[in-house]
Amino acid sequence: MTVRVRFAPSPTGMFHVGGARSALQNWIFAKQQGGVFVLRIEDTDAARNKPEWTEGILSALEWIGIDRGSYEGPYFQSSYAGEHRAAAQRLYEGGRAYYCDCTREDVQARTGPQQRGYDGFCRDRGLGPGEGRALRFRTPDEGETVVVDLVRGEPTFENKLIEDFVIARGDGSPVFLLANVVDDMSMGITHVIRAEEHLPNTPKQQLLWDALGVKPPIWAHVPVVVNEKRQKLSKRRDKVALEAYRDEGYLADAMRNYLMLLGWAPSGDREIVPWSVIEQEFRLDEVNPSPAFFDEKKLRAFNGDYIRALPVEDFVAACQPWLTGTGTIAPPPWQPEEFDPAAFAAVAPLAQTRIAVLSEIVPNVDFLFLADPLIDEAAWAKAMKEGAADLLDAAIVAFEALESWDAESLKATLEAVGAERGLKLGKAQAPVRVAVTGRTVGLPLFESLEVLGRDRTLTRLRAARVRLV
Ligand code: GLU
């Protein structure tokens, strides 16, 4: 039997990192089993779906390595409405479902407000279809439903505690629970790997598989992803969109490696491992069922490690979208014609060891491409204290006299200028750095001055000096 898995996102918003995690797990599982990965867009909630969210899902999947054309689909759930209705009809005709005209108020009037779920009032009333009548599944009164779950063992649900749930609304439209099962069935899905939040649906769905006469799939409910307060990651509160991480300059390799560590770890005491090792070693039955902490700080540090591990030419290439402002990435503060690729290549190795996300490249190098540096006023106030004017005067004179404009000579020169004033190099650097780059922190100063060149450096030092008068 060929393993067939599916990833079935609803296109109702930005693509959630938890969804990306489930997609990758499905993807790897299919690959390991020589199986097929199916992409199904569950777009039946017409009020909340937007075509751009679907496009966002496809491109986000592609970004983390699930290429278009390498999977089956995308299928669109809305195209199968006929099958969903037919299945509902079959369940009704087979006596497995019945029509019900109770309103929520009717039910509550009978059961009291505390009681949850449906009381079975219409079970034996023999109502036929009609406007406003929902179709309910007749759950078994006895026995239990045992879910075979690769992550959770065999969660077992007593059937008598499962209410007669709705499978089609009063307007005849089938609900998610049923549509999802019918599609999995007709797409031959053998393993359903999805987030834990769907576990409560699972006994109901398994009852539907049974009632429709098809062997249910094997399930794997992977842990919910939580923030540092152990709250489920939510789009209202947390940064959850994969696209946001991409645009901030997380590398796809770092991101997908990190996502796979949510609830699982490769062998040995290591976290940063080649993707091929993850693809080989990942096991669904090793996934820890408890909530997985999405640690943004750790992800950042992780990304920094991945950035540092890149060959420098790959790093230069990876920075391009931020240097030019591509797609949804904001343009840099300089004009395209001001950008100098040679100057960038010269400082790239220095930047590569210092940034954790690629978007940080821009504030580190903007001084090279802007006619005037962007002065951070707080940095200016901090660096341009008493003695700064005198130091800048001396530095200007000493730099003007330099024969060779290179980092080493610049450093020796400023060291001497500082020493004459009883200043350590760090203190002597501060006013020069702010005058030239506009900031108190950044790339190593003397290499920066070397690349910026004599004229521009001196012009900026003089301009700062004028401002201090
Ligand atoms: N469309 C559902 C969701 O996005 C997925 C359901 C499933 O994977 O079975 O939550």
Image (cartoon, rainbow, N blue to C red):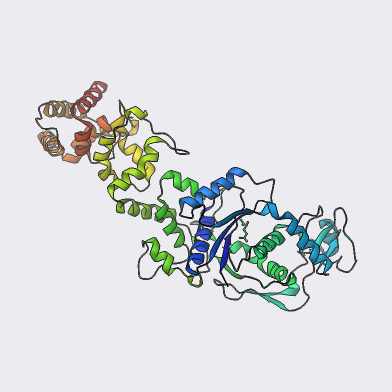
Left or right of 34, for residue 176 = right
Relative vertical location of residue 266 with respect to residue 130 in this rendering, above or below: below
Q: Quadrant of residue 72?
A: bottom right
Q: Quadrant of the N terminus?
A: bottom right
Q: List x then y, in percent, for residue 439.
A: 30, 35
Q: Is residue 222 visible?
A: yes
359 vs 113, left or right, is left
* Ligand 1 image-quadrant field: bottom right
**Which residue: 13% across, 26% down?**
400
Determine which quarter of the picture holds residue 197: bottom right
Report whether 97 appears left or right of 353.
right
In front of the other: 359 or 392:
359
Image position, residue 39 (x, y; %)? 58, 56
Residue in view at x 51 percent, y 65 percent:
30
User: Can the viewer see residue 241?
Assistant: no
Q: Quadrant of the C terminus?
A: top left
Q: Is residue 162 left or right of residue 239?
A: right
Most extreme residue toward the bottom, as rendered? 143
Observer-nearest of 218 and 3: 3
Q: Residue at left 29%, top 50%?
A: 311
Instruction: Return the x and y of residue 109 as percentages of the image width and height.
Output: 85, 60
Image height check: is 292 above or below 158? above
**Residue 282 coordinates in the image, percent (x, y):** 45, 68
